[in-house]
Amino acid sequence: MFSILTLVIVVVIAAIVGFYMLNKIMNPNEIMVTKSDVSAELITIKGGFTDSVSRYRGYKASFENNTLYIKIKGSKMPFGGNSGDFNISLANTYGQIDKIYLQGTDNSKKLIWSNN
């Protein structure tokens, strides 16, 4: 017979694992970018995941030394949310951008746009 404490532990662990799988920063090597464009007003990035399982959950952007870093959030859960494709449009409040990188949690990065 399960005790209530065992049941609570199982539910908490399942919730933590589920949250992690729903909001994971994806490895840049698992992402393909089909279009990236920068203007004085707008930054657009279009793409998707290289596998058919991952679902797009959002992004985080940071800016340092004229370089924009984008962390794509995804999920391996096959239900709910968006498809694996994404279309990010954000206002260019950064000014001069020289490069855009996709960045993972381990600071791995992949160049997706360069002003050069």
Image (cartoon, rainbow, N blue to C red):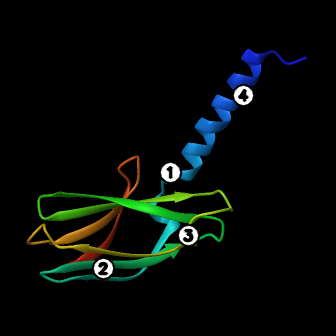
SS class of the residue under badge 1? strand
SS class of the residue under badge 3? loop
In the depicted structure, whether residue 52 falls above or below residue 62: below
Q: CA distance from mark 4 to mark 2?
A: 42 Å
The residue under label 3 is 82
The residue under label 4 is 10
Q: Callout 4 environment at 10 Å: few (<14), some (14 to 19), or many (20+)?
A: few
Front of the two marks 3 and 1? 3
Residue at the (50%, 51%) spot, across then down? 23
In the displayed image of the protein, which residue is found farthest to the left? 95
Q: Is residue 47 left or right of residue 5?
A: left
Q: Callout 1 environment at 10 Å: few (<14), some (14 to 19), or many (20+)?
A: some
Q: Amino acid at mark 1?
A: Lys
In the displayed image of the protein, which residue is found farthest to the front? 4
Q: CA distance from mark 4 to mark 1?
A: 21 Å
SS class of the residue under badge 2? strand
Q: Callout 3 environment at 10 Å: few (<14), some (14 to 19), or many (20+)?
A: some
In the depicted structure, whether residue 116 falls above or below residue 14: below
The residue under label 1 is 24
The residue under label 2 is 44
In the displayed image of the protein, which residue is found farthest to the right? 1
Front of the two marks 4 and 1? 4
- Between 5 and 69, the one lying in front of the other is 5
